[in-house]
Amino acid sequence: MKESMLDVPGARLRHFVRGSGPLLVLIAGGPGDASMNEALASHLEDRYTVLTYDRRGLSGSTTDEPEVTPATHADDLSHLLSAHTSEPAHVFGSSLGGLISLELAVRHPEQVGVVIAHEAPVTRLLPEPERVAAIQDFLGAEEVFQAEGVMAGLRRSATFLDIDPTDREPDVEPAAWGPDMLRNAEFLLTYDTPAIRAHVLDLAELKGSPARVVPAAGESSRHIWPHKCARLLAEELGTTCEMLPGGHNGYAFRPRATAERIHQVLTERSRQSVAS
């Protein structure tokens, strides 16, 4: 595995590349940095060149402009891709990572092959009053964070996302919350979460994108609204919502099974594209 830094407008991005084969980018959700995808990457590197990274403001990446948006993150990822390939790359993103992957397909479609967007919080797809309730979930987490601190804000988020650390593969241990992760969570709740609330995905542009966008959701998360967002996005795009193992954080808690499903979906969707 090779660790590198890349200067992009307003930030420096720490990223890691391992394996061989077609380029596949993994984008973590929430406060997750590259380490959140470590286990998933280890199960994919025998078939793909896997790129993981710390989003600007997290862990080893810096930012001069903390007021970020999903579009900012998508542009950052575009610079990373340009530094590593001239060919379209596959992308897997979960939660905020899924939203970033959708923005990449809108803003830089020529750089993207298959995009798997797992439970991206596209709240505008939800009917009233579910959309209002989803926005209130984010606001509630931000308010608790401001009043009671970062761990309380995270617990509030984990409640509405129903994060279940017991729903995991036997050899997976939940990540310890060290200083980096706490700083990452503070950045998330200060800057990224309000940006998610305000974000409006351009569905018309997404439908017109040549990228092959695949909405995905967790097998264990049918009762939470991000799962419904994925199903509604699939309906909008006229495609199938693929089921992945586990719940909202299945990529971290069930990395072995998730890697197999990612490979299966990428293989199937790539063949469909060739056939058409």
Image (spheres, rainbow, N blue to C red):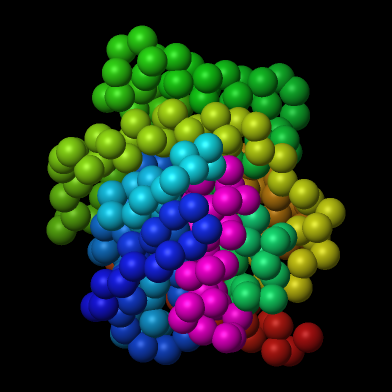
Any magenta on residue 73? yes
Quarter of the image with the C terminus is bottom right
Q: Quadrant of residue 180?
A: top left
Which residue is pictured at 46% across the width and 81% down the height? 84
Q: How many marks?
A: 0
Q: Is residue 74 visible?
A: yes
Q: Nearer the viewer, residue 67 or 64?
A: 64
Which residue is pictured at 48% across the width and 33% down the height? 191
| Magenta-drawn segment | 69-97
Q: Is residue 155 above or below residue 178?
A: above
- Give percent across and percent down for residue 269: 62, 77
Which residue is pictured at 58% across the width and 43% down the height? 69
- Give percent across and percent down for residue 215: 62, 57
Any magenta on residue 228? no
- Give percent across and percent down for residue 153: 36, 22
Q: Is residue 152 above or below residue 97?
A: above
Which residue is pictured at 75% across the width and 29% down the height? 127
Q: Is residue 2 left or right of residue 143?
A: left
Q: Quadrant of residue 78?
A: bottom right
Q: Is residue 225 visible?
A: no
Q: Nearer the viewer, residue 246 or 273?
A: 273
Q: Nearer the viewer, residue 268 or 49?
A: 49
- Give percent across and percent down for residue 158: 37, 30
Q: Quadrant of residue 86?
A: bottom right
Q: Is residue 23 above or below residue 253?
A: below
Quarter of the image with the N terminus is bottom left
Q: Is residue 183 left or right of residue 135?
A: left
